[in-house]
Structures are given as C-alpha cells and as structure tokens.
Image (cartoon, rainbow, N blue to C red):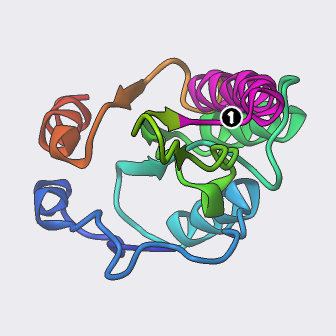
Amino acid sequence: EVRKAAGPLAELATVKLAPEDPPVTPAARDLAGGVKRAIEELGKLTTPRKALFIVGDGIDGAGAKAPSGAMRELQRLLEEKHIVAFAAALQVDLPPLGSPVPPPVTVNPKTGDEVTDPVLEEQFAAADIEWKKIKDQAVADLKILVNGQAQKLTSAGNFDGAVSGFVSL
C-alpha cells in the first residue's frame, strides 16, 4: 500500500503508519511486486536524485526461512537505476499477519489459577519459533534489498528516527 506518493523527503514525517482498523483477515503480501512497481514509478520522475523508503514487516508472500532471490534482483535494479533505498521494518505479532494463535487460557474454578493445555502450549511454542525465523529472514532480506540501509522499529513511534536517518542519506 502506498502511503505517500513521490514528493519531497522532508514530507515523510507526516505519514501515518497506523491502519484505521486492525487486520482481521490474513494479510496479503507482495513486497517484491510493490518494490518493482515503485521502481517503475520512480523511473518516470525527472528529478536528479530518486529515493525509496519502505516501511513494512519485510515479509513477501507467505514468508520464508530462506533468503529471497527476488530481493537480490530488486536490489540490483535499485543500484542500476541509481535509486537510494531505505527500509524501516515494523513487525507486528498478530495472527492475521502470520503469528501463531496462542492457546486458550481457562481458569480453574477451584483454585482460580489460569491453565493452558500443555500440548497446545507446546504446539504454540514450536509455531512461534518458526514465525520468529520468518521474521528474522524478512529483516535480513530487507537489508539485502536496501544495501544494509534498514532499521528495525520496535513501534510506530520510532518512525521519526527512521525518517531522520533516511533523509540524511
């Protein structure tokens, strides 16, 4: 999704990252397609300097635990077209965005203690490890895409710092 069309870099600070509504259905991801489209759009500009600022979780498609060939190819295109690129990775752990669903918690009526099914807890832990591998690979792919010019954000509030870093490139 394009949140800010081509324009002066100084205007990036006005971009709002938070969606109007949290996702409730699985998110469709096409990072490679979006970057390719951005390269095409930037190619139409006549400005002497072109820049691309990517904000997202870095996951392309369903995600992968292996390096992305598409990101390497797009990185080559960015260099070829002399486009400066920067990425801010903001990864959110929500089931519609790919994270595993935690097991349900019940309350023991006699003790008042919270209880989870150990089998479901173990399945969740294994799925969470796989999810973290996908997220780590996504950040690694973003770093490849932008020649190391990437910052991992811990919250949308860190966006201002990322924009400052990008504008100073």
Q: Report the side of 20 relative to 142 (left or right).
A: left
- The front one of 65 and 10 is 65
Residue at position x 75%, y 37% in the image: 71
* Label 1, residues with CA under 10 Å away: few <14, some 14-19, many ≥20: many
* Dominant secondary structure, magenta: helix
Q: Which residue is mark 1?
A: 75
Can residue 65 be found in the magenta stretch? no
Q: Report the side of 166 relative to 29 (left or right).
A: left
Question: In the structure shown, which secondary structural element does the residue marked by tag 1 occupy?
Answer: helix
Residue at position x 52%, y 73% in the image: 23
Relative to 61, does residue 85 appear above or below in the rendering?
A: above
- The front one of 145 and 22 is 22
The residue segment tinted magenta is: 115-143
Residue 72: quarter of image: top right
- The front one of 30 and 121 is 121
Relative to 55, does residue 69 appear above or below in the rendering?
A: above
Residue 12: quarter of image: bottom left
Q: Report the side of 158 relative to 39 (left or right).
A: left
Residue 58 spot, x, y in % from top left: 60, 42
Residue at position x 82%, y 37% in the image: 73
Q: Which image quarter is the C terminus in? A: top left
Residue 53 spot, x, y in % from top left: 39, 49
Relative to 139, does residue 18 appear above or below in the rendering?
A: below
Residue at position x 42%, y 50% in the image: 55
Residue 147 spot, x, y in % from top left: 55, 21
Q: Report the side of 83 relative to 18 (left or right).
A: right
Residue at the farthest front position: 110
